Image (cartoon, rainbow, N blue to C red):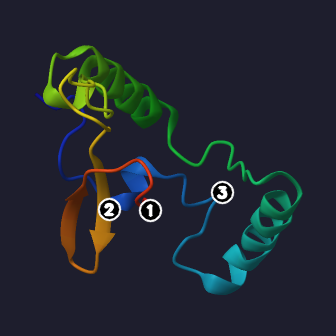
Amino acid sequence: MSVVPESRPLAALVDLERYPLCNDAAFEPITERCRVQLQESSFACLPGFLRSDVAQLMTTEVLKALRAPTAANRPLVPTMNPRWTSMPLITCGGANMKVGNSLSQPMC
């Protein structure tokens, strides 16, 4: 069950006075700061972008989802079967996915 309502206006989620997303000219200095941050550290920080109540609700929802027992919580790497001579690998073939049978096959 979702804690955050499915549909909210953008202004209810984001501080649009601080981050004027709908005004390209006003948002350009913020964009440039983000570019510089990304270049320097591979990370950009937008303090106060999400309204604090929304950030708290999202945090609660994510933590709740992380604790929920689902298939998504299982390891991504398959367990090695003693009868296998190698670990099966998934490789990309255009829109088709193929399962390989050798550790030497390329991964995508």
User: Which residue bears the numbered disc 3?
Assistant: 18
Image quadrant for the C terminus?
bottom left
User: Which residue bears the numbered disc 1?
Assistant: 106
Please tell me whether mark 3 or mark 2 is closer to you in this view. 2
Q: Measuring 26% from the left and 51% from the top, which residue is drawn there? A: 101
Q: Element at badge 1?
A: loop
- Contact between marks 2 and 1 (CB within 8 A): the answer is yes
Amino acid found under the numbered disc labelled 3: Arg
Q: Against 83, is 23 above or below?
A: below
Cα distance in 3D space between marks 3 and 2: 44 Å
Q: Element at badge 2?
A: strand
Mark 3 vs 1, N-terminal side? 3
Q: Residue furthest bottom?
A: 25
Q: What number of labels is visible?
A: 3
Q: Against 6, is 20 above or below?
A: below
- Coordinates of residue 57 in the picture (x, y in percent): 35, 28
Q: Measuring 75% from the left and 67% from the top, which residue is drawn there? A: 30
Please rate how many residues cluster around mark 1, counting C-alpha atoms within 10 Å: few if below 14, some from 14 to 19, many from 20: few
On residue 91, the disc is 2
Amino acid found under the numbered disc labelled 1: Pro
Amino acid found under the numbered disc labelled 2: Thr
Nearer-the-camera pick, 54 or 103:
103
Q: Measuring 71% from the left and 48% from the top, which residue is drawn there? A: 45
